[in-house]
Image (spheres, rainbow, N blue to C red):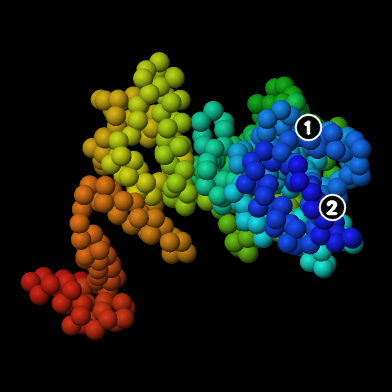
Amino acid sequence: MTHDAATHDAASVWVVDDDRSVRFVLATALREAGYEVTAFDSARGVLDAIGGRAPPELLFTDVRMPGDDGLVLLDAIKARHPQLPVIVMSAYTDIASTAGAFRGGAHEFLSKPFDLDAAVALAAQALAPGRARRGDAVAVESMPTIDAAAGDALAGGALIGDAPAMQALFRAIGRLAQAPLGVLVTGETGTGKELVARALHRESPRARKPFIALNTAAVPSELLESELFGHEAGAFTGAVRRHVGRFEQADGGTLFLDEIGDMPLPLQTRLLRVLAENEFFRVGGRELIRVDVRVIAATHQNLNALVAEGRFRADLLHRLDVVRLQLPPLRARRDDIPRLSERFLRAAALKFDAPVKRFAPAALQRMLAHDWPGNVRELENLCWRLAALAPGDVIVAADLDAVFAEGAVVAPVSSASPDWEAALGAWARARLDAGSVDLNAEARARFDKALFDAALAHTGGHRSEAAAKLGLGRNTLTRKLGSGRKPRKPV
């Protein structure tokens, strides 16, 4: 244990971590910021110290330590000093640990490795305004929109991923699970929106109550009202008995409404009333039904655009969109593909009672270069198919080429994202692994060809216009294309 005071009235901060290097650099950064810092290497040291001295004004603690871990320490500290802000740190950021920290009353969860300036700013924000150094506390909105550039794993209902954006998603879920707020989950098909909803429910105080999911786009519009709110016997032709709707089924728990953008306008009005009043009538009924349901909605559509077109109610969007979690496509988090693939192959091997297959390096590079229009769901389906059909225990590039050639469609790269750079990087790594030399010249030639072909296709074969579009002279374009190539005649 070490102790160092900076100034007489400096805020007292304790740092607990069994990693000496982490203790040293964090304590040093905090002292340089003007705080009085005491460092400990175990939870036991903190509990022994806090019994005979004044508590700190802020505590940083690691999660995984010998003896009692950081979450045990958090519980013990909060039992004695419930107002003491505690910042939990961990290199193992997952939903269980983040949710456990926030459920225990943590002020914030800090993923390792972290930026020291960010940690110091977080300390200023956590301390009471009167104690924050030089009044430079970071302002925090009470209900922020959380853009978690993240995704999912569709195996075993688990969310996995090592990309920084996944760590942000885990922290967001851990914090939001404890708050009874509406959440809107957005993202392309196959990115795991229902998994996010299930995680929010599983880690919430509602976990022992039902989780009910309904895809509003999968139910005919004339039946959707009955599916949501139920109906009484005789309410319409074929209604021979009372039907309990999804809202009643989810009472006390969570209702997940997928593809909310496809809900008809009349039902949007009814849904808005339920969200506002927590009550409704069954179809054909006179009994007022009261429920306590947390609604989590999801969509792949741009709801703001639907509002502008008059196809979605603005007041309903505001009610649903208290906090937003936006999930990116898999092509935006390619570094997670190897881990996801391994998990899916293991799940398939367990199901088939067969040896676990693996991807050869060249095949994995082929996976990294693919754009995954179906996102993680497409990756999962591909892994299961290869686990069943690939002839060897090692999946080679030829196995992938055969599958992709059978109809896999490469999603167009958004003009707003640099995904082509990730594909280029994957191609370069594969070529370098294969022993290629003079890669720069090869890449430039292929880049020029792709660019010029696109420009010529755009202009119908007019070289002068294509050159102008690219900001080049016609002679430059002709020289790069090669004098032996005949221009296409415009149609």
* Type of amino acid at the residue the image marks with label 1: Arg
Task: Give the structural element (helix, strand or loop) at label 1.
Answer: helix
Q: Nearer the viewer, residue 322 or 15?
A: 15
As drawn, the label of residue 44 is 1
Number of marks in the rendered image? 2
Quadrant containing the C terminus is bottom left
Q: Nearer the viewer, residue 23 or 452?
A: 23
Q: CA distance from mark 2 to mark 1?
A: 19 Å
The correct choice, above or below, for 28 with respect to 224 in the image is below
Percent across and percent down for residue 453 are 24, 67
Tell me whether circle 2 and circle 1 mark residues in contact (CB < 8 Å): no
- Quadrant location of residue 443? bottom left
Q: Is residue 477 visible?
A: yes
As drawn, the label of residue 101 is none
Q: Nearer the viewer, residue 72 or 315?
A: 72
| Drawn side of residue 478 relative to residue 467, left or right | left
Quadrant containing the N terminus is top right
Percent across and percent down for residue 338 are 42, 39
Which residue is at the far left? 484
* Type of amino acid at the residue the image marks with label 2: Ser
As drawn, the label of residue 12 is 2
Q: Earlier in the sequence, mark 2 or mark 1?
A: 2
Residue displayed at 52% across by 47% down: 163
Task: Give the structural element (helix, strand or loop) at label 2.
Answer: strand
Which residue is at the far top? 353
Percent across and percent down for residue 472 are 27, 81
Q: Nearer the viewer, residue 449 or 112?
A: 112
Residue displayed at 65% across by 26% down: 238
Q: What is the crowding at mark 2: few (fewer than 14 residues within 10 Å), some, or many (at least 20)?
A: many
The correct choice, above or below, for 302 with respect to 64 in the image is below
- Quadrant location of residue 54? top right
| Drawn side of residue 433 relative to residue 305, left or right | left
